[in-house]
Image: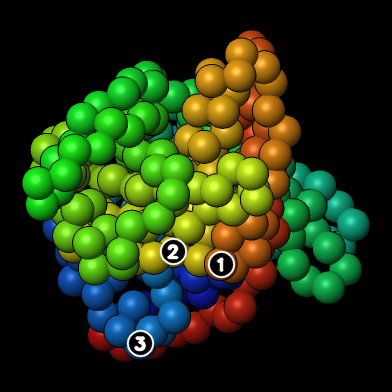
């Protein structure tokens, strides 16, 4: 089995190139992530008559994995340092194909710009946790919901809360973005129910986008902001009449063939 290990702003991602049946995604992802304990998620990539595709193990949409997959495809298609490419992918959880601009740097890394899906809605919802009530904004996008939580919550409480709140919302995948907008920081916690994964992620592209969309709606203005996360910074641009643009950097750390 052939796979790539990608590093998009610390959000280490396994991308499996060998064809795998969808019913085997979780088992294969679990094994490959066990071989790569720094990995936070896994996806399955390929090309067919419709072009390039990425399917996440949990069926969610992931902007960092999309950026990583685009970098892999650009590399496979022969991009050279100093060149640009535009890769369009069909991605799990996204209602429409996703365009990614890729620039190959001299150091072997890639700068990516992902045209992220628009939010379907932003609503205020009430959540209960151990007798406490929270009124929090929920940004619903294709394939994932994000709660914007301005402040902090004890780690164990947050991990319990996200599982219960995911069930409450009926979501396939839920993120809680613990935000300090004055400092420009995000701490992303993401639970993919169908994949059975729960991670304090090094960075979260869809969560960064959700935060930008939320701030844009709240202020009524366009947003161009970088949010510092444990793995580094991601930049989000939210403008009228266009898709949010998520910008980051990807390193393809290795390509490996193994038997599983």
Q: Which mark is in front, 1 or 3?
A: 1
Quadrant assignment for the N terminus? bottom left
Question: Which residue is drawn at the image coordinates 69% and 46% (left, top)?
Answer: 226
Q: Position of residue 157 (x, y in %)?
A: 22, 61
- Colouring style: rainbow
Q: Residue furthest front?
A: 132
The residue tagged 2 is 201
Quadrant assignment for the C terminus? bottom left
Question: Which residue is drawn at the image coordinates 49% and 83% (left, top)?
Answer: 256
Determine contact: label 2, label 1, CB under 8 Å: yes
Q: CA distance from mark 1 to mark 3?
A: 23 Å
Q: Is residue 52 visible?
A: no
- Residue count near mark 1 (Cα–Cα under 10 Å), binned few <14, some 14–19, many ≥20: some
* Residue placed most toward the observer, 257 or 106: 106
Q: Position of residue 248 (x, y in %)?
A: 68, 53
56 displayed left or right of 212: left
97 displayed left or right of 22: right
Q: Residue 238's quadrant in the figure? A: top right
The residue tagged 1 is 230
Disc sitting over residue 35 in the figure = 3
Question: Which residue is drawn at the image coordinates 55% and 48% (left, top)?
Answer: 180
Quick one: label 2 or label 1, which is nearer the N terminus? 2
* Residue placed most toward the observer, 140 or 81: 140
């Amino acid at each position: 089995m052939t796979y790539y290990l990608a590093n998009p702003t610390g959000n280490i991602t396994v991308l499996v190139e060998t064809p795998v049946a969808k019913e085997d995604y979780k088992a294969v992802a679990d094994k490959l992530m066990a071989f790569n304990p720094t990995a936070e998620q896994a996806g399955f990539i390929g090309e067919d008559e419709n072009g390039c595709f990425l399917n996440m193990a949990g069926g969610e949409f992931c902007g960092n994995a999309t950026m990583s997959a685009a970098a892999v495809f650009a590399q496979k298609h022969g991009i050279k340092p100093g060149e640009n490419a535009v890769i369009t992918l069909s991605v799990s959880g996204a209602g429409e194909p996703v365009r990614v601009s890729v620039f190959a740097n001299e150091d072997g890394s890639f700068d990516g710009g992902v045209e992220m899906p628009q939010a379907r809605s932003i609503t205020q919802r009430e959540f209960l946790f151990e007798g406490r009530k929270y009124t929090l904004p929920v940004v619903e996008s294709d394939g994932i919901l994000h709660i914007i939580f301005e402040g902090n919550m004890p780690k164990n409480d947050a991990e319990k809360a996200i599982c219960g709140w995911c069930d409450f919302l009926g979501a396939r995948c839920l993120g809680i973005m613990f935000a300090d907008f004055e400092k420009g920081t995000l701490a992303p916690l993401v639970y993919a129910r169908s994949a059975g994964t729960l991670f304090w992620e090094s960075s979260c592209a869809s969560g960064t986008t959700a935060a930008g969309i939320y701030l844009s709606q709240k202020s009524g203005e366009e947003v161009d902001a970088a949010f510092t996360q444990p793995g580094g910074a991601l930049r989000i641009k939210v403008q009228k009449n266009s898709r949010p643009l998520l910008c980051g950097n990807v390193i393809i750390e290795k390509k490996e063939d193994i038997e599983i």
